[in-house]
Image (tube, coloured by chain):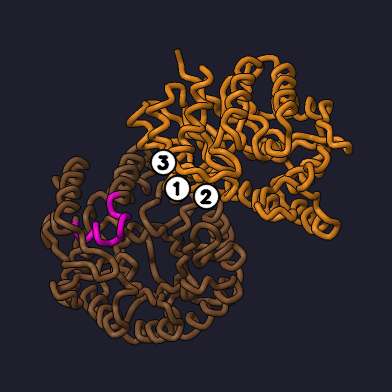
């Protein structure tokens, strides 16, 4: 029997702290997870790209999943991302997530192959039928038809096929693509969770999105929570204010994501170490620039410092 | 003086006769239909009005005809995009003389110049007229260069009469950046939703919409627009999904690699009792089998039952 899972609000996707020698800092990671839960995260999702997922070994990903489940200790749901370059790794991670006690998995068909719709369908079915957990998929269309895109039609077929298919992380950020998924999915499976990849929520919440996997929550959890509360209250004026501020944060961080974000975390008293190559680690100049911008945005003054 | 805000803008299709000439008798009927069914302004010829398939003289003739037909009842926004800067500039100047209320242009067709050149192209068009000027994102990917929010900020600095952006990108990030960044530089900077997706743009602070599907389902479009105007975004969801459904059927029909929806729109217009012919070549009308499939899907849309039939 599949356990129902409640996904709603600005859900936090912790970064992966690294030690100075670039090794995975398990203790730091536990602190990071606990920080998010204590600051109102309605769910924990790891390891997304923000967590350098593809630069972690499979063993590190399993270790992190175990730490996340243990640290959260059932306070909120934990979703484990199992997308990799190789489907065999994804299957392995999915089975491991279930054994470790995760509440859901988030998956995508291997990205770099530019799979056809039929190939994505088969891939998701293989992974989703390998576990008894609720399954989320990750819609990641890139420009010019690249990336892995879940069309409305593909979503419909997957819902038909998979009773444990409960939601979509949507990174299309596009009215037409979003509505193709939402009108089909919410029509077939009410309660299907459409979760925005970044906090582009003001455009999508009125159309049925239930929340987001956060990009800026490591820096500004208060702002994230205020934003979602405004959306739920239909206080569009406040929501707009928060959305525009979060958009500015996103502009700061999206460059060489997540290096700048990790850099900015130093400013908030939560040093999480360097970013693994080939991604750069934020330079001193970049850090100073980030500090100035965070101050101008009134983030430095209004958001929690330290752990 | 209150700044020009066009509100709910209908984008009429352009009808052709069998000999490919513009069918002005039908065009007059189309314009009257839009005015009777909720248009607060007209924009023409937008991509759904097959602007690219019209010759320069025809584009001017169409605008002159429309302005005369409308007789000041609503503002007419003239779309003047082209590949060459001087061609688009002259067309904008002509539109101003003809009595258009505003000018719309997107980045140049076909060429892929560097961002600075695209900005220059748009600056020349905008500064050639005194009318409110709207820059538009390219209607379909790959038809021209992308319009980025950074380019829009540069344009605000250089074009005093730049009133806003028409967004056909449907990109949440672009809309957020343009509205928040644009209003810092120019209070009241507008974003008009393009392509029938009103809710997200309005929630973010958009001020109006240009709607190509208004020729098929003017009531539905009007209702969503009204709800958005009252900030009732949650209530608008069901009807916005209906519009998206229609949009999806229209765009998926036809052989166009761009999914421009031209064949679908004109077929759906005919099904509503408003025969507008078929698109100009090289865009082909729907083949027999596809036409059957399309008509079946459109007939199954319950919400179309309350929409006006005929002219």
Give the distance between the C-alpha atoms of the residues marked 2 and 1, in whole angstroms: 7 Å
| Quarter of the image where the N terminus of chain B is located | top left
Instruction: Tell whether A167 sits left or right of B89.
Output: left
Is circle 2 on the same chain as circle 1? no
The alpha-carbon separation of the residues under discs 1 and 3 comes to: 12 Å
The image position of residue B63, as x and y in percent, is 70, 23
Which residue occupies the extreme right position in the image?
A: B18
Q: Which residues are magenta?
A: A252-263
Please state the chain letter of the residue tagged with numbered disc 3 in the rendered image. B
Query: Are the two marked residues, 1 and 3, in contact with CB atoms closer than 8 angstroms?
Result: no
Q: Secondary structure at mark 1?
A: helix
Q: Secondary structure at mark 3?
A: helix
Q: Would you say residue A256 sits in the magenta stretch?
A: yes
Rendered orange, the chain in question is B
Dot label at residue B172: 1
Do the residues bearing badges 2 and 1 touch, measured as CB atoms within 8 Å?
Answer: yes
Residue A131 position by quadrant: bottom left
Estimate the x, y position of residue B226 in percent, counting from the top left. Answer: 55, 33
Is residue B226 inside the magenta stretch?
Answer: no
Residue underneath mark 2? A175
**Relative to A284, does residue A296 appear above or below in the rendering?**
above
Residue linked to disc 3: B149
Instruction: Provide the letter of the chain coloured brown.
Output: A
Cβ–Cβ below 8 Å for labels 2 and 3?
Answer: no
Res B219 quadrant in image? top right
Identified at 35% across, 72% down, the residue is A79
């Amino acid at each position: 029997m599949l356990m129902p899972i409640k996904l709603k609000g600005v859900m936090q996707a912790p970064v992966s702290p690294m030690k100075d020698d670039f090794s995975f800092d398990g203790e730091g990671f536990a602190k990071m997870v606990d920080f998010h839960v204590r600051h109102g995260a309605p769910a924990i999702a790891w390891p997304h790209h923000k967590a350098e997922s593809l630069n972690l070994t499979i063993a590190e990903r399993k270790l992190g999943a175990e730490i996340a489940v243990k640290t959260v200790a059932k306070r909120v749901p934990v979703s484990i991302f199992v997308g990799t370059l190789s489907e065999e790794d994804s299957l392995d991670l999915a089975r491991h997530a279930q054994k470790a006690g995760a509440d859901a998995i988030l998956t995508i068909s291997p990205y770099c192959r530019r799979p056809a719709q039929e190939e994505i369908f088969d891939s998701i079915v293989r992974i989703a039928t390998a576990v008894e957990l609720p399954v989320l998929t990750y819609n990641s269309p890139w420009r010019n038809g690249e990336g892995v895109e879940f069309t409305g039609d593909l979503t419909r077929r997957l819902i038909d096929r998979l009773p444990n298919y409960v939601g979509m992380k949507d990174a299309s950020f596009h009215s037409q693509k979003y509505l193709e998924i939402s009108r089909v999915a919410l029509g077939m499976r009410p309660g299907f969770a459409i979760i925005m990849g970044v906090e582009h929520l003001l455009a999508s919440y009125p159309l049925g999105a239930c929340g987001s996997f956060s990009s800026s929550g490591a820096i500004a959890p208060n702002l994230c929570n205020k934003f979602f509360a405004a959306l739920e209250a239909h206080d569009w004026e406040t929501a707009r204010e928060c959305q525009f501020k979060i958009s500015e944060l996103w502009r700061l961080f999206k460059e060489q994501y997540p290096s700048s974000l990790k850099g900015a975390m130093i400013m908030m008293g939560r040093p999480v170490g360097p970013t693994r190559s080939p991604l750069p680690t934020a330079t001193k100049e970049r850090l100073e620039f980030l500090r100035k911008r965070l101050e101008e945005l009134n983030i430095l003054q209004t958001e929690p410092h330290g752990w | 003086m209150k700044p020009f805000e066009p509100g709910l803008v209908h984008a009429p299709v352009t009808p052709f006769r069998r000999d490919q000439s513009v069918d002005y008798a039908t065009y007059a009927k189309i314009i009257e239909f839009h005015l009777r069914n909720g248009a607060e302004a007209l924009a023409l010829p937008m991509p759904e009005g097959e602007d690219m398939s019209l010759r320069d003289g025809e584009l001017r003739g169409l605008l002159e005809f429309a302005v005369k037909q409308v007789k000041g009842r609503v503002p007419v926004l003239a779309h003047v995009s082209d590949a060459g800067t001087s061609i688009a500039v002259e067309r904008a100047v002509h539109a101003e003389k003809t009595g258009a209320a505003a000018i719309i242009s997107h980045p140049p067709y076909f060429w892929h110049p560097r961002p600075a050149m695209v900005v220059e192209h748009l600056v020349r068009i905008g500064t050639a007229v005194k009318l409110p000027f709207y820059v538009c994102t390219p209607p379909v990917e790959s038809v021209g260069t992308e319009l980025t929010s950074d380019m829009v900020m540069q344009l605000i600095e250089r074009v005093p009469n730049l009133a806003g952006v028409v967004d056909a990108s449907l990109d949440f990030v672009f809309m957020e950046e343009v509205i928040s960044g644009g209003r810092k530089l120019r209070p009241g900077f507008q974003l008009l939703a393009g392509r029938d997706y009103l809710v997200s743009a309005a929630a973010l602070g958009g001020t109006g919409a240009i709607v190509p599907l208004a020729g098929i389902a003017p009531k539905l479009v009007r209702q969503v627009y009204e709800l958005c105007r009252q900030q009732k975004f949650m209530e608008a969801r069901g009807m916005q999904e209906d519009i998206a459904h229609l949009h999806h059927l229209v765009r998926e029909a036809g052989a166009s690699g761009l999914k421009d929806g031209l064949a679908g729109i004109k077929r759906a217009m005919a099904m509503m009792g408003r025969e507008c012919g078929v698109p100009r070549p090289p865009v082909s009308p729907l083949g027999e089998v596809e036409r059957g499939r399309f008509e079946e899907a459109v007939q199954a849309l319950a919400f179309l039952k309350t929409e006006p039939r005929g002219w």
